Image (tube, rainbow, N blue to C red):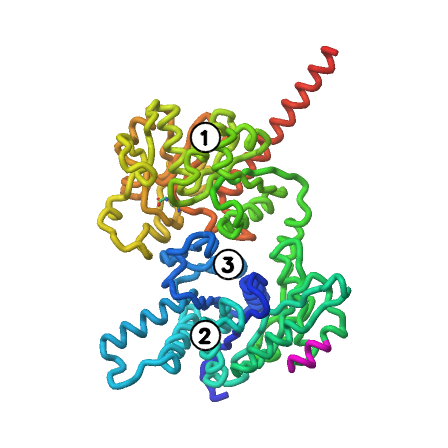
Amino acid sequence: MIQNEKPAIKYIFITGGVTSSLGKGIAASSLGLLLKCRGLRVMLQKLDPYINVDPGTMNPYQHGEVYVLNDGSETDLDLGHYERFIGVNLSSVNNVTSGQVYERVITRERRGDYLGATVQVIPHITNEIKTRIRMASEVKDGVDVVITEIGGTVGDIESLPFLEAIRQMGIDEGRGNVLFIHLTYVPYLKAAEELKTKPTQHSVKALREIGIQPDILLCRSQKELTKDVKNKIALFCNVPPEAVIEDLDCDTIYEVPLLFHDEMLDNLVIHYLNLWCKDLDLSEWEKIVHRIKNPSKEATIGICGKYIHIKDAYKSIIESFVHAGIENDCRVNIEWISSEDVKKYGPEKYLKDIDGLLIPGGFGERGIEGKIEAVQYVRENMIPFFGICLGMQCATIEYARNVCSIPDANSLEFDQTTANPVIHLMEDQKKITQKGGTMRLGAYPCILKPDTIAAKAYGVDEISERHRHRYEFNNEFREILKNEGMSLSGVSPDGSLVEIIEVPGHPWYLGVQFHPELQSRPDKAHPLFREFVKAGLEYRERQSGSKSKKSEKVKSVE
Ligand code: GLN
């Protein structure tokens, strides 16, 4: 190496084969964590082949949760895993879609940047993809390794330009600086009592046809891969046996880095990429996994929403409960409650045995009345309540209707003719006509009122949280709700936006206009989730106390 020359940035590409949903995001995050724990500066990035500019315009059935970053980008939920595993705050360069790539190339074409040329997938689209991959390394503190996950499954038509671009990166950057990892599936056929390697062989064949020879195979499987199976995969897929890494199903996603390390994945990667780094120290992570797997208490939290059949829609909330469980030495069982069922059959049936209710974010009118009834039930029965975004808006409507005696109180999102819009469109949303990327997005500061649940939980008086909404608490109703006991415990610095509501006198009742679940981490649970679970545990204890007192009474009467 010439003296003072900057060491080359290393690129790791993770592709997926056989089927979707194998956990490429978790695999990428787990490898990122292992390299980070070896002292390397790691950046993670996802390339998504769809034509939408971002997932913000897709519904949760299509896409799952839209993960919002501090800078306001609406991104894929895998970015949530990246942030949680490697403890960074990412930005728009970390999620690239075909839509963004084509939009940029077409804009440049119209401007005349390519005058005279036929604009084509190769080289114009692939060049733009490569530029975006390299941009992921341009961060202030520098990066040693960029791990880029390619969305979709090898063989899909739409991901071809991405695969071609990463193939070219292998040449551009020099072989020793680029690593191709392929995540594949090795199914177990019960009838044959055998693990089957054929789908993996075919998937690798498809990859090789486009010019990419994977260096490492991560083999997702329900059963341990025997030596024979590993050898067979190695032989047919043209990799050494030690590069066939087992990726077994496990109890918690946070265990995956430990499994990968047992399979020596990090050793292999640093060897292939010739990386200089320190020995691995995973002790902190091991503690996290141990605490997740061995809690001494449990609590049951109900989540009442309309997308309860697709858990991916609430990914960060589910993870936030895992983190809050770690800090409370508790397993949080989640009870999924359909808001439409609550409306149909009444709240009692679904809410009487839970230790806390969370109403998450959402859009549109369907299921709203059920959510409002659910908030009323937990408010009146002193069950801990946590409303997030739409959940906070439902709580405001419920309070206005049932405590402030405004029976037609509603949000303009659900009833454009209501005379009492306690939730209304934000001022700067009124002129907006384009739907994509135009909500109030990203991190905003919020000032907390002293001695409230929020201020005590955070332990500071100013916070920053991420938002994604168009509607807000209507200030015309501030006094009315306050006079009836509601506390506006968090507001924007200029005082104009209500960000947090509470009901003093209730054991734990809090609604937030932002999305706290986007900032919870396994090594640092979000303070509101931590305190909500704590309140749930206390509620459970009180309940079991009063139940055992009741049964004692019955016995003494007998
Ligand atoms: N639909 C509501 C709004 O736009 C809430 C959004 C959300 O829950 N993310 O304000």
Residue highlighted by disc 3: 87
Residue lying furthest front: 191
Q: Secondary structure at mark 1?
A: helix
x, y percent for residue 299: 61, 38
Quadrant of the rendered image containing residue 394: top left
What is the three-letter code of the residue carrying label 1?
Glu
Residue 233 forms part of the magenta stretch: yes
Q: Are marks 2 and 3 in contact (CB under 8 Å)?
A: no
Query: Spatial distance from mark 1 to mark 2, Cα to Cα?
Result: 48 Å
What is the three-letter code of the residue carrying label 3?
Gly
Horizontal side, residue 297 vs residue 32: left or right:
right
Residue 70 forms part of the magenta stretch: no
Query: Spatial distance from mark 2 to mark 3, Cα to Cα?
Result: 27 Å
The C terminus: image quadrant: top right
Query: Spatial distance from mark 3 to mark 1, Cα to Cα?
Result: 38 Å
Near mark 1 (Cα within 10 A), the count class, few <14, some 14-19 or many ≥20, is many
Q: Secondary structure at mark 2?
A: helix
Residue highlighted by disc 2: 162
Q: Nearer the viewer, residue 516 or 99?
A: 99
What is the three-letter code of the residue carrying label 2?
Phe
User: Mark 3 against mark 1, which lies toward the viewer?
Assistant: 1
Residue lying furthest bottom: 2
| Circle number at residue 472 | none
Ligand 1 quadrant assignment: top left
- The residue positioned 40% from the left and 41% from the top of the image is 390
State the extent of the magenta-drawn residues as a range.
Answer: 231-238
Q: Mark 1 or mark 3, which is nearer the start of the sequence?
A: 3
Q: Mark 2 or mark 1, which is nearer the start of the sequence?
A: 2
Residue highlighted by disc 1: 373
x, y percent for residue 65: 46, 53
